[in-house]
């Protein structure tokens, strides 16, 4: 793959490091909820485990984002990888509920290896100008998707070990988690040689300072409100989707892993259409269209009882939502000054993830007490609302 202009040595190291992190996230996304179910935990307990990780990830986003704007990015790349390693080690060595809670919390401090992570976005904005960023984010999205494809395929490894070698569910998954730990170690080694960039600060007029020395709180507040609706909506849809397939259709990681892998692979090809979509419709209209289409597909997904159609709809809605991820990431780096990029993304990510953190537990309760379909219908409505908020707050007004 030919990398776009702007990929220097440090960004190449970052790209490969992120790919190794995505390898782990690829199989965790598939096996985590199913593994917890196989251990005997209820949907509410599983939702709680996922909520813990999401809430801590919200705190991680705002703290790491704000501090990295002040003290540099590299130390937070190192810390993130270290916490990711610790989570995998805990998972590999114990299946106790409260140790899993600890692992989820620690791991969330290193979760988010995608290019939307505040520290990553801040680092990219430090090293590139606004014109080159869309292509940079698209290239990183492609490599992340390819790595996640391999990771998703690894999700079937525990089932193979159980059938082929007679291992129990815990021992079969332990090997997978040790693979994840090794992958995170490699990711850590790759970020150590990277160099921080000293950002040129924007001169402020006397009296222009704001809370915490940030001037763009108005824009950040609007962006945070918009992202909070997408976080909550996608939390209802995505968090327990593997568990939904496990309960409704009786399929596990050995089946869902390849399906998720195909989804990721197809998303790679979808990213090649991003420049055309942005040129044709603009960033905001592309995001709005993605949210509305995803919402419609999710509603149909929630009511279908035919397994092949459910798979097709799941693949389709995930591709559509992932398509605009690089567009949104690039847009986020352009709405504030470079010195405030990580803060803006950190605060908005906190708003998104803190609301998202309640979704898995609520969805788990709905799975048990109401309906398997209800969380998806609620999530679809929130995604459509998210598209409307993008239109209200950020779509340029057409002059009379």
Image: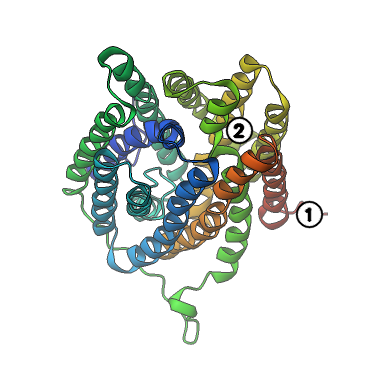
Coloring scheme used: rainbow
* Identity of the residue drawn at 73% across and 27% down: 303
Disc on res. 360: none
**Which residue bears the numbered disc 2?**
277
For this rendering, which residue is in front, 212 or 334?
Answer: 212
In the orientation shown, which residue stands out farthest toward the bottom? 207
Q: Is residue 360 left or right of residue 30?
A: right
The residue tagged with tag 1: helix, strand or loop? loop
Apparent side of residue 73 relative to residue 336 in the rendered image (left or right): left
Q: Residue at x 41, y 44 (%)?
A: 115
Q: Mark 1 packing: few (<14 Cα in 10 Å), some, or many (20+)?
A: few
Residue 226, image x, y percentages: 63, 55
User: Is there any visible trace of residue 285 in the rendered image?
Assistant: no
Task: Quarter of the image for the N terminus: give it.
Answer: top left
* Residue most extreme to the top: 164
From the image, which quarter does the C terminus lie in? Answer: bottom right
For this orientation, the residue located farthest to the right is 400
Rendered image quadrant of residue 276: top right
Of residue 247 and residue 27, the one placed in the foreground of this image is: 247
| Residue on which disc 1 sits | 399
Residue 105: % across, % down: 37, 54
Q: Earlier in the sequence, mark 2 or mark 1?
A: 2
Rounded to the nearest angstrom, the CA distance separating label 2 from label 1 is: 23 Å
- The foreground one among 12 and 349 is 349
């Amino acid at each position: 793959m030919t990398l776009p202009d702007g990929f220097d040595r440090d960004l190449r190291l970052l790209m490969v490091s992120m790919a190794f992190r995505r390898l782990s996230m690829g199989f965790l996304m598939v096996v985590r909820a199913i593994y917890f179910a196989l251990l005997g935990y209820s949907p509410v307990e599983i939702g709680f485990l996922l909520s813990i990780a999401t809430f801590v990830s919200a705190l991680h986003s705002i703290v790491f984002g704000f501090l990295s704007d002040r003290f540099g990015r590299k130390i937070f790349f190192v810390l993130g990888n270290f916490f990711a390693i610790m989570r995998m080690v805990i998972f590999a060595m114990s299946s106790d509920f409260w140790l899993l809670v600890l692992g989820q919390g620690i791991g969330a401090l290193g979760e988010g290896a995608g290019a939307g992570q505040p520290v990553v976005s801040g680092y990219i904005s430090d090293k590139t100008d606004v014109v080159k960023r869309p292509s940079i984010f698209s290239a990183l999205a492609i490599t992340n998707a390819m790595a996640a494809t391999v990771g998703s395929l690894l999700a079937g490894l525990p089932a193979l070990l159980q059938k082929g070698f007679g291992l129990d569910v815990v021992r079969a998954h332990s090997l997978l988690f040790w693979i994840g730990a090794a992958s995170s170690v490699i990711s850590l080694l790759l970020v150590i040689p990277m160099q921080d960039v000293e950002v040129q600060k924007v001169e402020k007029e006397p009296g222009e300072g704001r809370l915490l020395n940030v001037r763009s709180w108005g824009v950040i507040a609007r962006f945070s409100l918009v992202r909070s609706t997408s976080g909550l909506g996608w939390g209802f849809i995505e968090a327990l989707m593997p568990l939904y397939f496990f309960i409704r259709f009786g399929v596990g990681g050995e089946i869902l892993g390849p399906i998720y892998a195909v989804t990721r692979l197809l998303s790679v090809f979808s990213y090649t259409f991003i420049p055309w979509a942005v040129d044709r419709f603009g960033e905001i209209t592309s995001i709005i269209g993605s949210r509305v289409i995803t919402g419609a597909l999710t509603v149909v997904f929630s009511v279908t009882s035919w397994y092949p159609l459910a798979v097709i709809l799941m693949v389709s809605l995930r591709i559509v939502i992932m398509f605009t991820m690089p567009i949104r990431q690039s847009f986020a780096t352009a709405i504030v000054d470079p010195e405030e990029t990580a803060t803006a993304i950190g605060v908005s990510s906190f708003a998104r993830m803190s609301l998202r953190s309640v979704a898995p537990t609520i969805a788990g309760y709905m799975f048990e007490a109401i309906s398997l379909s209800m969380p998806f219908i609620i999530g679809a409505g929130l995604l459509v609302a998210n598209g409307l908020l993008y239109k209200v707050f950020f779509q340029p007004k057409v002059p009379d």
